[in-house]
Amino acid sequence: MWSLDARSAGSGRSVSATCVSFAVTCERGYVTRHREGYDRRRVVVRPTDAALDGTERFLGFAGAEIAAAVRETPDAELRAIRAFLGRMTQAASAANVRLRDAPASARTEA
C-alpha cells in the first residue's frame, strides 16, 4: 500500500498535481475508485474494462514493433547491448547487497 505523499515524492510531482492527474484519469474512464472495508479512508483503484482493452491493443502493436526492431538489429549490436545490460544488472545486484548489509546510518550518507 502506498500513500499519495510517498508516490508523489517519488515522481517529483506535488501532491496536488498527482491528485489532479488521478482525477482526470477517473473522469476519462480509465480507472474507478471504491471505498471498501472498514477503513473508509482507503480507496481502492481498479482499471476499467475500456482501459484494459486499450492497454491490450497498445501492447499488441508495441510488441509487434519491438519484435521487428529486434529482428532488424545486427547480431554484434545485440551482443553489445546484452553485455551492457548484464553489467548494469550485476551493478544493481551488488548495490542491493551493499544496501541490505549496510547499517541504517550509512545509507543516508553519500
Image: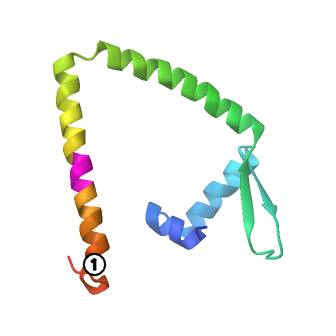
State the SS at label 1: helix
Disc 1 crowd, CA 10 A, few/some/many (<14, 14-19, 20+) = few
Q: Position of residue 66 (x, y in %)?
A: 41, 23
Residue sitting farthest toward the bottom: 105
Q: Out of 38 and 90, give the one closest to the viewer.
A: 90
90 in magenta:
yes
In this rendering, would 82 be left or right of 30?
left
- Residue at the spot x=24%, y=63% of the render? 95
Q: Quadrant of residue 43?
A: bottom right
Q: Position of residue 40 (x, y in %)?
A: 81, 74
Number of numbered discs: 1
In this rendering, would 23 be left or right of 108?
right
Q: Is residue 42 above or below residue 89?
A: below
Q: Position of residue 65 (x, y in %)?
A: 44, 19
Color scheme of the displayed model: rainbow
- Span highlighted in magenta in the image: 88-92
Q: Is residue 72 above or below residue 96?
A: above
Q: Which residue is mark 1?
A: 107
- Residue at the spot x=79%, y=76% of the render? 39
- Residue at the spot x=18%, y=36% of the render? 83
Q: Out of 79 and 13, give the one closest to the viewer.
A: 79
The amino acid on which the numbered mark 1 sits, given as a three-letter code, is Arg
Q: Quadrant of the N terminus?
A: bottom right
Q: Position of residue 76 (x, y in %)?
A: 16, 20
Q: Main secondary structure of the magenta part?
A: helix
In this rendering, would 85 be left or right of 39?
left
Q: Quadrant of the C terminus?
A: bottom left
In this rendering, would 42 be left or right of 78?
right
- Residue at the spot x=75%, y=49% of the render? 27
Q: Is residue 74 above or below residue 42?
A: above
